[in-house]
Amino acid sequence: MSLLEIKNLSVNFSILNGSVKAVDDISLNIGAGETVAIVGESGSGKSQTVLAALGLLAENGVASGSVKFEGQELIGLERKKLNQIRGNQISMVFQDPMTSLNPCMRISDQMTEVLTLHKGMSKSEALLESVRMLDAGRLPDAKQVITRFPHELSGGMRQRVMIAIALSTEPKILIADEPTTALDVTVQAQMLELFKGLTKDFGTALILITHDLGVVAGIADRMMVMYAGRLVEKGTVDELFYSPHHPYTFGLLHSTPHVDNPEMRLEPIDGLPPSLENLPSGCAFNPRCEFKLDRCLVEAPPLIKSANGRSNACFYKGELVKRRKAGE
Amino acid sequence: MFRFIIKRLGIAIPTLLILIVFSFTLMHSAPGGPFTSERPLPPQVLANIEAKYGLDQPFYKQVTNYIVGIVTKGDFGPSFKYKDRTVNDIIAQGFPVTLKYGIWSFIIAVSVGISLGIVAAIKHNSIIDYFAVGFSIGAQVLPNFVMAPILVIIFTLWLGWLPGGGWNGGQWQYLIMPIIALSTSYMASIARIMRSSMLEVLNSNYIRTAKAKGLSNRQIIFKHALKPALLPVITYLGPAFVGMITGSVVIDMYFSTGGIGQMFVNSALNRDYSVIMGITILIGVLTIAFNLVVDILYAWIDPKIRY
Amino acid sequence: MVIRSKKIAQMAENLAAHEMGESHSLWADARRRFFKNKAAVISLVVLTLIVAFAFLAPYFTKWSNEEIDWAILGSVAEDGKPSFARGHYFGADPLGRDLFARVAQGTQISLMVGFVGAFIAVIVGTLYGAIAGYFGGRIDNIMMRIVDILMSIPYMFVLILLLVVFGRSIFMLFVGLGLISWLDMSRIVRGQTMVLKNKEFVEAAIAGGSTKFTIIVRHIIPNLVGIVIVYASLLVPAMILTESFISFLGLGVQEPNTSWGALISEGAGTVLYGTLWQLLFPLAFFVAGLFSFFFIGDGLRDALDPKDR
């Protein structure tokens, strides 16, 4: 049995005139200790998927479908029981460490509260444990840092604090939503090392949400690619990187620089992701797709399973090769 | 902290001096002295009176004497109209009255306003939220001088429950209408500020973090959201305080409480300059002191402000 | 007022972030947005009716605002009730004067106080703020410190002091209101100017050799119009409120002139004799007038705020 099982999850937001579907029929499994990456551009629904799973959607959002943690259904679970799971069994690290810590509370209070709440520690035990976690997060001078307020720390330090808070309850799953996006490039690498090291040490499963394929390559076992709220392709990182089946995955890979192949031309995907309020008919990717068929304009391709646990939602079955534009 | 207070006082004291000198100059430049009346006094008598009040001395000396008197002895000088009473006597008589219902009004406006704002934000788009919004919009056009007569119509004229004015040693029946009239519009403003800032905080990233930690609603609101959401309300407390002090003049007049505001207006109508000045300076000191308290409170809640 | 200042500060931020577009389409767009706002449009209609009443009402009654109806003088509480037969549509005031004519007169004066007070604020506040913001440095520091000091003084008391010393007259009331009304305006304008002076078109004017005064008057001030209009539209009701407050105390507008505040004061004073109409008619105009101004101000702010465009 997998640790977390998301099945046919959809998220709808009611807006001024009607509603938009931010997540459309997503399914995902994650086993203990595994690292799964969810990849997509902003607005592709990757964050909303995990927020829905933890009951953290904005006021106007509604989730339908099923999210099971160790067999326990989370969607529609009463608040009290949900609170015993989130922050305890499943923790989350958010994108922007600048705004994700409470500006009016000391780091110590923000760290110890999860331990006193979920682990029943006393205030002083929790404080000791928090310092230990900060040390584990390789934050220099933890005893000093813990007495400060968030605005006195740098972005990297804050993100280390966020990670320390998330891991301090020894959760079974850690969800990291673009954990490195808001940080300096130099800090990003350190942070990824930290994730890799800590999840391994604690045996924690990691769901990593990112738009950066470079991050995925370094850390994830499996990945799933989302576009306009739908899952377009999933599989192991190795397979998807070496032979993508979906034109969008293919496009993403060609627009990402490779360290081992610096000569490669970068070819960005033309156009912009569609607005969720008026999606194109058929496959949502068709306006930007180089390989589109007539069928793609009228019919959305279903997600079809293939060998090795791979899935792909595309009608085009040919080989994906970059076509040179005329004149090049 | 100590340096912060000193720095604030460094601004407050010159402000106060400017206020004193300004009012004193204004008073001095009034066409016709304070003792000009319909029946002109004989020059000899006038000279005697002026000598008694020190008005024959050069202007700068009068100002310095006045300020020295206030600073060293807390003495605002004699009343110009009531021969045997000092300004201090008059203030000592009226101030406790205004203070009593003023403090109650302030406490009620702040506590009810904040609670209403919080509840409205938590129960966003519920009936109580609509009520809070409607109340805060409506109360904009219900300043104290509109509230007071409306309350009298309802509670005195129609229901006959409460006396239409007077003080009677500050018994509760005499307190209710002054307090409601004075506090309503500020209560509404505070509720409105609290509601919108609470909504903003509840939608913030760090509250999402708190939810993700598995904290209960109660912990989220009181431990995480309340402090940052209170900051805009605290900023508003200074202006609200000034507004309520000013409004107390209307309350004192309309309900004939015998408070300091009634004395102020009567002195204004009688041109009793020393009383007007004394009260103005007292209000100035109170305002400045209160603003200092607000600044300290703000700095205490917002860790970004270091002194 | 404070809440509104905060919203205006927000608008100023949005304006600063927004690049100046074509001014023609900007205004057309603002107008369209304003007329889509139901509360603002209704308020505009109500306000127009109030203004029309203030100036046309005297032609519809046989009573003037000063004439005493001797027939009812001794028995205003019974015979002074609103009545078409006697020609007192709103009833009579405690002195037997026609309230309909008095309310029209009071409306005129209250509106005048509101507009003149706001006008002074616009002129003084805009110039003061623009100069402080444009020159910056020491000048700015001193000028703004003065504003800080003036703002921390309980102005209502100083205003009353002023009225007592120099006599109670409409002129002194204007002077007093003018003295305090521009403070907030100058702060807002200063902030906006500091943003504007770093924009390209000002640099171009400097490079073109324009004098500082010309730059302020020709280039800075025209770009402040939006925020000044919005703030001024909220100052009008604020001025009316202040005037009403002072007149309620009997220290503002003096007989035979009157204003909303003075009429409410008169009506409030006689409430216990049961002559409710003396309070309710002026109060209705006061409430309707203030509401209209507030909603129009909000509508203008939403229309001119570039944020959700």
Image: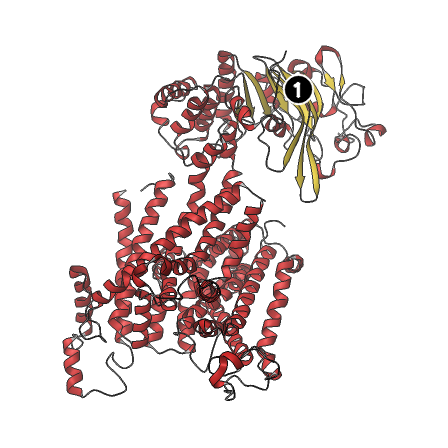
Q: Residue at x 44, y 28 (%)?
A: A158
Left or right: C11, with B281 as reference point: right
Give the total of numbered labels: 1
Left or right: B80, with A136 as reference point: left
| Image: A19 above or below B161 | above
**Label 1 CA crowd tier, 10 Å (few <14, some 14–19, many 20+):** some
* Scheme of image coloration: secondary structure
Say which quarter of the image contains residue A107. Answer: top left
Asked whether B68 or A296 is in front, the reply is B68
Q: Where is residue B131 in the image (x, y as percent from the top left)?
A: 55, 50
Residue behind mark 1: A28
Look at label 1 and name its amino acid: Leu
- Residue at disc 1, secondary structure: strand
Asked whether C14 or A217 is in front, the reply is C14
Asked whether C127 or C150 is in front, the reply is C150
Q: In the rendered image, is residue A31 in sight?
A: yes
Asked whether C291 or C94 is in front, the reply is C94
